[in-house]
Image (cartoon, grey):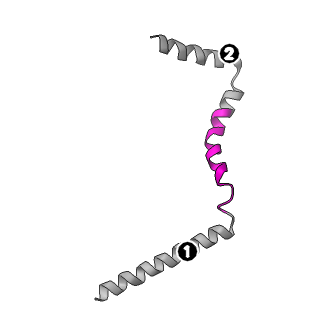
Amino acid sequence: MELTWITIIASLFMGIGAVLVFVFAVKKNYFRNLEDAKYQVFWSDVEELVESPPQEKQEKQDEGSSEIRD
């Protein structure tokens, strides 16, 4: 019976801790701009395409098309 009470108290503390972390995150604005995160993954790929010289782009396209033909 003693072990049951220990587990109940431990689960209550974990629940209260989770609620406190959630309230802290909301107050610190950690949940703003959630949509922005998914776009940040792709920015490096877009910048790579924009910054590479045209000759490199053509070589990459030629390499890709030769692999398809083989």
- Most extreme residue toward the bottom is 2
Which kind of residue does numbered mark 1 sit on? Val
Q: Is residue 1 magenta?
A: no
Does the magenta stretch mainly form a helix, a strand or a loop? helix
Whether tag 2 and tag 1 are in contact, CB under 8 A, the answer is no
The numbered dot on residue 55 is: 2
Q: Is residue 37 above or below residue 50?
A: below
Q: Residue at x 70, y 21 (%)?
A: 53
**Mark 1 neighbour class, 10 Å CA radius: few under 14, some 14 to 19, many 20 or more:** few
Q: Quadrant of residue 32?
A: bottom right
Residue 48: percent from the left, percent from the top? 66, 30
The numbered dot on residue 19 is: 1
Q: Is residue 6 above or below residue 24?
A: below
**Mark closer to the chain start, 2 or 1:** 1
Q: Is residue 3 left or right of residue 43?
A: left
Q: Is residue 68 above or below residue 19?
A: above
Residue 26: percent from the left, percent from the top? 65, 68
> In which quadrant of the rendered image does the N terminus lie?
bottom left
Most foreground residue, 61 or 56: 61
* Range of residues picked out in magenta: 30-46
Most foreground residue, 64 or 56: 64
